[in-house]
Amino acid sequence: MTTWDLLVVNAAVASMDPARRGPYGLVPDGGVGVIDGRVGWTGPMADLPSATSAAHTIDAAGALVTPGLVDCHTHLVFGGDRVGEFEARLSGVGYEDLARRGGGIASTVAATRAAGEDELVRAAARRAEQLASDGVTTVEIKSGYGLDLETERRMLAAARRLGAELPLRVQTTFLGAHTVPDEYRGRADAYIDLVCDDMVPAVASAGLADAVDAFCEGIAFSAEQVTRVFDAARRHSLPVKLHADQLSDGGGAALAAAFAALSADHLEHTSPAGVRALAAAGTVAVLLPGATHTLGERARPPVAALRAAGVPLAVSTDANPGTSPLLSLRLACNLACTLLGLTPAEALAGATRIAARALGLAGRAGILAVGAVGDLVVWDAGQPAELVYWMGGRLANTVVVAGEVVRSA
Ligand code: DI6
Ligand code: FE
């Protein structure tokens, strides 16, 4: 007889498992059994073995259950704030202008360098809590506001601590090539030397980074410079991802594809050739509508072309102080539908199963299937599209991580 650590019964289980029926892999009168932190059984209640018992049982009474949500692109760890910049942009100053004047990312770099690790953890924990309280159980966190070895290390260590101290799985990404720091102005190649020769080896050998990212853009780094960073990542067996074609078409999508990147993110200006390259490489396209919205960007990622080419689509908050101060993954999903043309089913897959794939966790997170992590959410909702329909607020009723109830309403 199996004794589940946690058994959820009488639920509308949106398993997000493509092996099951419909876009949500919905099992209308279903259940989930978790043992040793993993899903050991899920299916129709009628199939639950009769000789079964559980240390803890949740009767969902018909409510919707999904896998824990996965936010696959955030910059949650940073010092200071950019509220003043928000006001300046509303009065007409452009984002790229601010960056050229030493505002933008550079101002967050100054504040982050000045912050200690405890301070970074405390501030980021408040933001992570907002995501987690509404059903996010896995979050990716990037560095990239340090731009020197010591601060990049401190950011990644802070992100790792969040994973240890909060009931949240944290995947870390080293984004040393986010922008050229002031002290290297006009010497971007020398800064890339530092990233490749010192920073990537140091964070890799300390086990601080699960992946390497870069910002391929006119105001940041060229495709040639990013290629050097990706070569360094490859030497240290770290997977890569890329901020690609956000403000202009810099060939970022094709570059990401050439390195079989886990994901290419943003893609507002990606060309048809870039779309084809992503499809051929199996690289996930991560859509970040919070940045589109905040920047008032008119260009849209080529969603119809990405879909037609079979590129997997993920949705994320891009939570960051400059271009996407967005702390609700469900609102990101809503914006992905209203601004970018996703269906609610695509958006929810993009915030679960496909987001996990963008983190190298395909089949292990963002899905309710045997062997996946036992992370799930019981929602104050009856049908999956409702999670995308409501703009923000909090719908998560009970959040479970590794079979343990970590919050309940
Ligand atoms: N693209 C973005 O949207 C964020 N980083 C990036 O490379 C913006 C980061 C910031 O403005 O602080
Ligand atoms: Fe970003």
Image (cartoon, grey):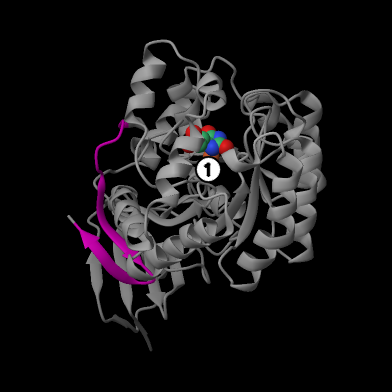
- According to the image, label 1 marks what residue? 350
- What range is drawn magenta here? 390-408
Three-letter amino acid code of the residue under disc 1: Gly
Classify the position of the N terminus by image quarter. Answer: bottom left
In this view, the residue in front, 409 or 295, is 295
Q: Where is residue 77 in the image (x, y as percent from the top left)?
A: 42, 51
Q: How crowded is mark 1: few (under 14 residues within 10 Å), some or many (20 or more)?
A: many
Task: Answer with the quarter of the image where residue 363 lies.
Answer: bottom right
Position of 65 compared to 237: left or right? left
Furthest residue toward top? 92
**Membership of 401 in magenta stretch:** yes
Does residue 44 appear anywhere in the picture? no
Position of 10 compared to 271: left or right? left
Task: Answer with the quarter of the image where residue 252 lies.
Answer: top right
Q: Position of residue 116 (x, y in %)?
A: 37, 59
Position of 101 compared to 268: left or right? left
Residue at 59% in and 21% down: 300
In this view, the residue in front, 390 or 225, is 225
Does residue 111 appear anywhere in the picture? yes
